[in-house]
Image (spheres, coloured by chain):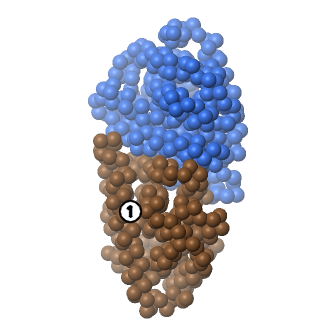
Chain colours: A blue, B brown
Amino acid sequence: MNYGDVIATGRLEFVSSESIIDQYREKVDARLVTLLPSEETLPTELHQAIRYSALGTGKRLRPAITMAAAKACGADPLLALDAGCATELVHCFSLIHDDLPAIDNDDLRRGQPTCHKAYGEAIAILAGDALFALAFEILAHSIADPAKAQKSLLCLARASGSQGLVGGEVLDIQAEGQSGDMALLQTIHARKTGALLGACCEIGAIIAGATAEHQANLKQFGEQIGLAFQVADDVLNETSTPEQLGKAVGSDYAMAKLTYPSLIGLDNSKNLASELVTEALKLIEGLPGDASELKGLAEYAVIRDW
Amino acid sequence: MNYGDVIATGRLEFVSSESIIDQYREKVDARLVTLLPSEETLPTELHQAIRYSALGTGKRLRPAITMAAAKACGADPLLALDAGCATELVHCFSLIHDDLPAIDNDDLRRGQPTCHKAYGEAIAILAGDALFALAFEILAHSIADPAKAQKSLLCLARASGSQGLVGGEVLDIQAEGQSGDMALLQTIHARKTGALLGACCEIGAIIAGATAEHQANLKQFGEQIGLAFQVADDVLNETSTPEQLGKAVGSDYAMAKLTYPSLIGLDNSKNLASELVTEALKLIEGLPGDASELKGLAEYAVIRDW
């Protein structure tokens, strides 16, 4: 399937992906409220900053993908709800830290003041740390089978650390203002976005009791969708209105960030996203469960308001 | 036993505790070198900052206590070496973040420039994050029995997060320049120091396959030793030379930090540390293994160069 065509004609599928997102988001948001620590147990500002950052207006793509991966492997997606929430908290932690003045120095996130703008730098750093710890706590607590829990925790830790999310952010800030090529850009996004989405899919598969081969395929699927998603984000960062984006348009360009459009142009970037999704979808053929939602979420990565 | 007397007369025991520390530190330092990610896999600066902070001149008290707790429960302490390293990395992560300009703004740590002074704030924040993730990765990877791994990971996550280490740091910075009492000070240190030392002891016990009762007692033992250690640190912060301390003397006082000496005076603080250790030692009577090293480490908390 050529997603270039779908972008032009596929509004129905786009709406369908949106409704998958909405349906999971509702469950995830309700569960996050319960999983976050209660007011009595925390210093007030930390409690507020944690909820401000974790209960904002995010799409909850990572939990949706975690749950849809479990469903694609034949399990009830609700079995992976808490694990999905854990992946979302890792995402929230990384956004808070990336936005800090010393790193990306962003004032707006999802249309709202960033955590450090709202609560100060000290609380923002520590709220990020607290959410990161909470992700592991939730994952360790929520999976009944110890072997599945151990494996999921290993996945999440690897995807988050120096060879995943955090390492990708370091490469990203080092690339600012430097000349770079596609190889570097792919490495940055493989770590910064691909690793965690790969872990989401793998954890969903682990919880569902999928075979080792299906776990590996789903991991790779998530990694590729992560790349596609990042290409799409780079495109949106240049073509959207500030209202659509929730932050200043072209801000990556202003920071002299390495982006796909800056390297290969807008049209080639859209085609690349499409090809990545097409390739990724081959990896999830023949799973034992219903993979339609997982496919819908993959398509969501490229079929957006371009 | 009155540790007030021991402080005056017990040089032999002090030396003995030092040698326990030295003996474990050697094993831990050698193992940490192997457990930290290799140069080829990481951006150079991140690699350097991680090693700078994790392989510094720390006492490695947390790994020593983790291993000694396993020994006290009848296991080979080497079984808990990697888990001990994981607790040390959580400690390193928290020091890097606490030292940041937005938090404690410290220029020196263990006699060396703090991580952000050496590598800049962005790398320091992310090196801390990477060490935190690595701690969970090591713990998930190193414990063969999934049930023990899951339980240990839950312990470490709880001790690190908003109701442990991170929450304690928030209370600590909020208490600066405010009037406070012993209840607040105890809460700060129970979270900031006690929680992680409690987790060290509990994880050592879990790995050793100790009974639930022994696990609970060891956790409480670690929490109390953590408090004793913090009282001792407050005393040392006021009575040492800068060379002994590796940072400016009286810096806590200069920041108008709430400390034990500022609330109850130096002598009462020394006595409190002694009482906490005496009470703690009652909790580890009757363990199935050799608890002599664990006792020695507890004594080390109060028998220092006052």
Q: Is residue A255 above or below residue B72?
A: above
Three-letter code for the amino acid on which mark 1 is drawn: Val
Q: Tell me where residue A70 appears, x and y as whole percent.
A: 62, 31
Taking the image as shown, residue B78 lies to the left or right of residue B201, namely left
Judged from the image, the secondary structure of the residue bearing numbered disc 1 is: helix
Residue drawn at (40%, 50%), measured in percent from left and top?
B127
- Which sits in the foreground, B179 or A263? A263
Q: Tell me where residue B175 appears, x and y as whole percent.
A: 57, 66
- Which sits in the foreground, B178 or B159? B159
Residue drawn at (46%, 88%), measured in percent from left and top?
B7
Q: Tell me where residue A14 appears, x and y as whole percent.
A: 61, 16
Residue named by callout 1: B28
Q: Is residue B117 above or below residue B277?
A: above
Q: Residues within 10 Å of mark 1 (few under 14, many from 20)?
A: many
Q: Is residue B14 above or below residue B142?
A: below
Quadrant of residue A187 within the rendered picture? top left
Residue drawn at (44%, 23%), measured in percent from left and top?
A231
- Taking the image as drawn, is residue B145 in sight? yes
Q: Tell me where residue B96 appears, x and y as whole percent.
A: 42, 57
- Which sits in the foreground, A198 or B131? A198
- Which sits in the foreground, A44 or A161? A161
- Taking the image as drawn, is residue B53 in sight? no
Residue drawn at (34%, 53%), measured in percent from left and top?
B34
The chain identifier of the residue carrying mark 1 reads: B
- Numbered label tally: 1
Residue placed furthest toward the left: A179
